[in-house]
Image (cartoon, coloured by chain):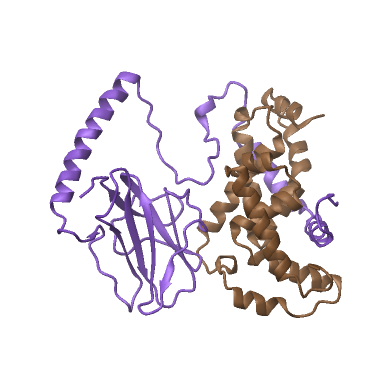
Amino acid sequence: MTDATLVRRVLEGDTAAFTTLVDRHAAACTRFATRMLGNREDAEDAVQEAFLRAYRSLARYEERQAFRTWLFQILVNRCRTAAVRRQRRQRMFLVDDSAVAAASVRPAVDASDLRTELRRAIDALDPEQREAFLLKHVELMSYDEMADATGVGVSALKMRVKRACDRMQWLLREVSDVGT
Amino acid sequence: MSEPDNPRWLDDVGDELRREIPVRAAWRAQLLDQVASARRPSLDDEISDFPPEPLHRAPGRRIVLSPLAGIAAALTFAAVGAGAAFLVLSSRSAGGDRNIAGASASPSTTTGTAVVSSSASAERETVRFELAAPTASHVALVGSFNEWNPVATPLQRDPSTGTWIVSLRLPPGRHVYAFVVDGDVTADPAAPRAADDDFGSANSVVLVSGRTS
């Protein structure tokens, strides 16, 4: 059963159909929000808010758009809001190239080290670059889908993805054979 | 998953980041409970009943006017705006910048201000935002003019004073904004405050008249 069919069923009164939508998309949403926000707790809050907002505004969903893209439009906004609302110092707002460079030169030799370095590199990206990179290379969206989800033009998104890739490659250049 | 045009390192990174993060059963149950207690959506819902989730704009009120009322409102707004601009500009000192917030920056504390330059075009004016935050590592400006994007408008630090500065060309009107200081959203301490934004933090207001000098 397609997402659009499930949405129709919810709107016709079968609220249990929304559970299927949650089960289909919660993992990807949690993955994106966790990578965006840097921790599981904030991510779960953002995803929960996104699903609730999606549920309450389900009548606005139009089938010409993929449900996942529509849901990510809400989620992207929730993540941006969560970042702005944060009242404590967040490392992802710091853009300190020298600190990042110093942190990235430690050699990594196994998978767990690679994951640590990868997390550090992702967190070191500017939020808008991180957002574009994750949607493109992790969620595998097309640029048109990304434009729908973010409200940003395709050209700007391509530039953000390119800059994110360049920066990731530089940050990871010393880690194992990644970035070579 | 690899894509034909991607270098191998990028595919490796994508594969690693694509590893699934398991959904916690307790979290799922809580979400479904909240869904069950929420008002059930239906095809009969008013389309405007719930915001369509615009991409991070500050919440605001939508006012719907009939065409005639819209024209009347536009004329009234133009008249009031012209009068206000005249009053504002008549109080401006000749040739200098106008300090909207009315406070000067102090190097020892976190203070800020928004200054509208007199060298503006008829449509937009240059507004200089300043925040004295000598110990801050990163300061950005968020506001209604950049969709509250915390990375769109970083301020540059003047090392001699510890003041963070950025200039923007803004259209005439009322602009709500705040600073993001090392991740903390803070109102401009030297500017008028906006009404609570429902985000749990206060915002500031700068008015741009749009008149050339």
Residue A106 appears in view = yes
User: Looking at the image, can residue B27 be seen?
Assistant: no
Q: Nearer the viewer, residue B46 or B11?
A: B11
Rendered shade, chain B: purple
What's the residue at 35%, 61% (across, down)?
A: B129
Taking B191 as reference, is B52 left or right?
A: right
Judge by depth and name the residue closer to the eye, B110 or A97.
A97
Does residue A124 appear left or right of residue B81 in this picture?
A: right
* Chain A as rendered: colour: brown
Relative to the observer, which residue lies in front, B164 or B179?
B164
Q: Residue at x 60, y 34 (%)?
A: A56
Looking at the picture, does residue A114 appear above or below residue A151? below
Q: Is residue B166 left or right of residue A150?
A: left
Q: Nearer the viewer, residue A84 or B140?
A: B140
Up/down of A113 relative to A26, above or below: below
Residue A57's x, y, as percent?
A: 59, 33
Q: What is the quadrant of the N terminus of chain A in the image?
A: top right
Q: Residue at x 79, y 59 (%)?
A: B10
Q: Quadrant of the C terminus of chain A?
A: bottom right
Q: Where is residue B178 drawn, in percent x and y?
A: 40, 58
The image quadrant that residue A130 belongs to is: bottom right
